[in-house]
Amino acid sequence: MDDNQYASVRKYAWWNDTDQTIEIDWDAINKVKDSEQGDLIKEYVSKLEGFQSQYDEQIEALEDIETTLQEIQERGQEEYTSLEDRTRDALIKQIQDKIDELTAVDEAINDTNQKLMDSI
């Protein structure tokens, strides 16, 4: 927006950086009698409203991006937890298989020892 073109009407409407909205002084606008000035104010307010609309769309797009990123992060955490669970389960199975194997060897040794003792 060309600041010089609307310098004379900026007192009627402006962008409020604090709350990110357009402020319009309707009382002051209603007192304007000059039609050219009134048309310029309308044009300026319209441009501000267009800016507000674009700003709101950008904020909404950013919020959508934030939501998507949060969903991706949550999905990543779930997948990581799932991977941890699968890894833990695989390690437990591997250890249990080794225990079962050693138990079988121990039973075979005990059985053989018992047979030796019985034959003596």
Image (cartoon, rainbow, N blue to C red):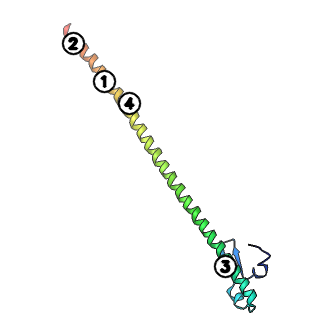
Q: Nearer the viewer, mark 1 or mark 3?
A: 3
Residue type at mark 4?
Answer: Gln
Task: Residue under label 1, please give it.
Answer: 103
Compare marks 2 and 4 and give the one earlier in the sequence. Answer: 4
Residue, x 68% and y 86% (percent of image)?
A: 26
User: How crowded is the residue under tag 3: few (<14 C-alpha within 10 Å), some, or many (20+)?
Assistant: few
Residue type at mark 3?
Answer: Ser
Extreme residue in the right direction: 4
Q: Is residue 11 above or below residue 70?
A: below
Task: Residue under label 2, please give it.
Answer: 115
Disc 3 element: helix
Task: Residue under label 3, please give it.
Answer: 46
Disc 4 element: helix
Give the Cα separation between the discs numbered 2 and 4.
31 Å
Give the Cα separation between the discs numbered 3 and 2.
102 Å
Task: Residue under label 4, please give it.
Answer: 94
Position of 73 with respect to 36 (left or right) is: left
Res 42 quadrant in image: bottom right
Residue 115 point in image, percent of width and height: 21, 12
User: How crowded is the residue under tag 2: few (<14 C-alpha within 10 Å), some, or many (20+)?
Assistant: few
Residue type at mark 2?
Answer: Lys
Give the Cα separation between the discs numbered 4 and 1.
14 Å
Residue 41 point in image, percent of width and height: 72, 83
Compare marks 3 and 2 and give the one earlier in the sequence. Answer: 3
Whether pointer 4 and pointer 1 mark residues with C-beta atoms closer than 8 Å, the reply is no
Quadrant occupied by the C terminus: top left
Res 106 quadrant in image: top left
Residue type at mark 1?
Answer: Thr
Quadrant occupied by the N terminus: bottom right
User: How crowded is the residue under tag 1: few (<14 C-alpha within 10 Å), some, or many (20+)?
Assistant: few
